Amino acid sequence: MREYPLEPSGPEMRAMSEAAMLVVEQFVNDLPEAPAKDLDGALELAEELREEAPEIGTSFESLLNTVAVSSQKAVNNSGPGFMAYIPGGGLYVSALADFLAAGFNRYVSLAAKAPALAQIEATVVRWLCDLFDYPPEARGVLTSGGSMANFSAVITARKAKLGENFSTGVLYTSEQSHASCAKAAYLAGFPRERIRMVPTDERLRMDADALTAMIEADRAAGLRPFMVTASAGTTNTGSVDPMARVGEVARAHDMWFHVDAAYGGPFRMTEYGRRLFQGIESADSITLDPHKAFFIPYGTGALIVREGFRLRAAHHVEADYLQDTDGLDEQIPSASEYGMELSRDFRGLRLWLPVKHHGLAAFRAALEEKLELTRYLYDELRTTPGFEVPLDPDLTAVPFRYLPERGNPDAFNRLLLERINDSKRVFLSSTLLDGHFIIRACIVSHRTHRDRVEEAVRIIRSAVQDLLALDAAAPWEQPVAR
């Protein structure tokens, strides 16, 4: 046995790296034809992985095979057929960025420890601020995802508007908003009865008049409305709240205006997105998820704040063991001063490397393609007899259902979704709208192109016909109020 087995030699590192790269390269190349869902044997494999930590090591090649097989036995969220939820495509260049970041293993949370790398993160934050026309004094922080970004947004708003005594504070968000908006408020110390769900209009966008009425009622009751969160693309349907109007309401009542743009934010690079997101530039803070519509691997969210000092004021703490740290905040912001974490991974490289390598034009073109594909899917479904497509899409989510002539539509569409996903060529998800079971397709992956969406349409139509061809004892064949 080697004296220091945790320190492999140069040739050993090279052999492991080459073996890993070959596996990943093959995996990525196979994504277009890999099943959209392959869970056969997944639970049995998971059972095998319940084991005690070994005293003696295992060969790297054997472990690499275990990881590769485990990755295959999953829903293929990186493939072109994944149109469920809001996919994260996983750019290959970003995967290399993670390898480089972990390999160099530099500490970037304090700028003085790795100034150039800290500047890469600061540059990425500035790019995101520029996307929304934020002023030079804006600041931000890269988080693990949109949930943590929304949490830090609540903490920042609480500090700015309520100070230390926030027991009577009230927050407002749409009944269609992401669950993390309410969860963030609850974890930030606000009881559930202080979290208001604002009704939506017929297009499932926040009703600004209802918001105003709720704020005024709470003020009359002696409470302190302090924050409203609008959505730039809801997870359920992709609906975009009227941000200009919501922002006006927030300012009229001296409230913090936050926008959850985890899904839709990058679409502001497009001409359509700039029109759609009118008013977002006035937000006090914005949540983004680059691991969605910037296509990078999971693990990167962002919060940007118009008045950057407010983000720092809400997160900065003093510690004796940091007294010898040279402050560079005027030159290069330290990530630890603007977020929850002191120790964290070098997230900025995941976005910096692909943007520098590909250029924004490539991202813009990909997003424009997704918008076009969504319009195609919407038009194909709404013009097919029997289908109900309740919303003209704001972004790239298309909710739909089929209405059989007899029986229970919810039961039919549950079976329809199962049959669609059993094709293993596409993978869709479901939600509830007005209490009804709805199938939803969301086109975000950079690997999803016209051929796969056309195939999805064929699969959906064929699945309907297959179900309708069943005999009269079909599961949905039961009387239901229409």
Image: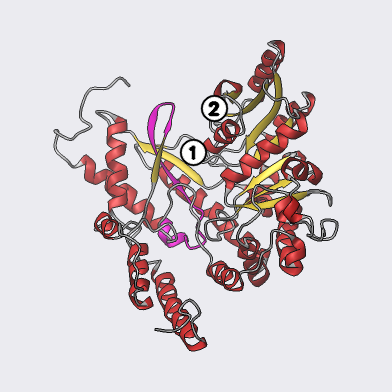
* Total marks in image: 2
Look at the numbered disc 1 and give the secondary structure of its residue.
loop
Q: Position of residue 453 (x, y in %)?
A: 42, 56
* Residue carrying label 2: 202
The answer to which of 261 and 448 lies nearer the viewer is 261
Q: Amino acid at mark 2?
A: Glu
Q: Which mark is residue 236?
A: 1
Q: Is residue 71 left or right of residue 267?
A: left
Q: Amino acid at mark 1?
A: Asn
Q: Which residues are magenta?
A: 432-453
Q: Is residue 84 magenta?
A: no
Q: Position of residue 209 (x, y in %)?
A: 67, 21
User: Which residue is located at x 27 percent, y 47 percent?
Assistant: 419
**At x 72% / y 49%, what residue is drawn?**
338
Give the alpha-carbon distance from disc 1 to disc 2, as whole Å: 14 Å
| Residue sitting farthest toward the bottom | 11
Res 249 label = none
Q: Nearer the viewer, mark 1 or mark 2?
A: 1
**Mark 1 vs mark 2: which is more N-terminal?**
2
For the point 69% across and 16% down, the residue is 223
Quarter holding the N terminus? bottom left
Tell me where residue 211 sits by quadrant: top right
